[in-house]
Image (spheres, rainbow, N blue to C red):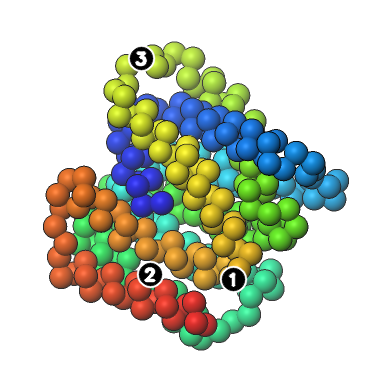
Amino acid sequence: MGGTYLWGKYSLQYIPPLTLGLIRFVAAALILHLGTKSFLPNMKIEKADRGRFIILSILVIPINQLLFLLGLRLTTPAHSALMYSTLPIFIYLISLSYKEESFAWLKSIGIAAAFMGVVLILDERGIDFGSDYVVGDLIILIAVMAWAFYTVVGLPLVRKYGAIFVTARALGLGTLMFIPLGLYYSLDFDFTKPPLMAYMGVLYMATMTSIVAYTIWYWALKYMDASKVGVINNFQPVITAIMSFALFGEQFTLVFIIGGAIIFAGVSLTLKG
């Protein structure tokens, strides 16, 4: 979600990445676990699917989200959004290799157009193509590739178990893997020091990102190709800009309007492809 970059960057000023991740993941995993226990009490993971669930849990927490938090501390929200705008490209390529999708020119052109629209918007908003942020950008790019694999590998499970159950179990298992590391690096942290707004940012990421956005992501995969779901992600810089306008009074520019129109056109082409 668009606010993840803004809230994440703000909260990381006061809370170290591994500690922030510990709070966020445990909160999200507990809420999802209680939800599935209440509404899906009889659903169990079949033995044949356990390995795939473990792979998903490794991809979503220890790799994707841990690297996202580490990378975000070393780069800017604009750079993070740019790295994530490559997501539909990776999803499309992986889907082709897994034979989940077939090649289509209209879809390919749409994905490329949406990416260029993101580049246009973010270039105006502060992309520095120098070396200052290269380490953070590369870390986030690896996180993006992990999320692309998480998307495609999870497809058969979503069709079988549903989005809520798969999201809950993947985040739950991933959180269990992360807890020892998170606790180790949080032992000396003073939890009373960060301001309330920093914890509000963590709460936003736990609920709106880890629970709502992740579940909607998998739910959408039941109704459209993974690459089409992925390209919708490229609306995030537009959402982030709108939130910046609402929160910080930033003004929309002609470049933003043109870039947003290109993204909209690219997404439209992809959805028709």
In this rendering, does residue 169 appear at all? no
* SS class, disc 3: loop
Q: Which residue is mark 2?
A: 115
In this rendering, does residue 87 appear at all? yes
- Quarter-wise, where is residue 126 in the image? bottom left
x, y percent for residue 156? 72, 60
Q: Amino acid at mark 1?
A: Asp
* SS class, disc 2: helix
Residue under the point 54% across and 69% down: 227
Q: Nearer the N terminus, badge 3 or badge 1?
A: 3
Instruction: Answer with left or right where residue 235 lies relative to residue 38.
Output: left
Q: Nearer the N terminus, badge 3 or badge 2?
A: 2
CA–CA distance between discs 3 and 2?
A: 41 Å
Q: Which residue is mark 3?
A: 192
Q: Amino acid at mark 2?
A: Phe
Farthest-out residue, right: 47
Q: Which residue is mark 1?
A: 225
* SS class, disc 1: loop
- Quarter-wise, where is residue 162 in the image? bottom right
Mark 1, residues whose alpha carbon is within 10 Å: few (<14), some, or many (≥20)? some
Q: Amino acid at mark 3?
A: Thr
x, y percent for residue 245? 19, 52
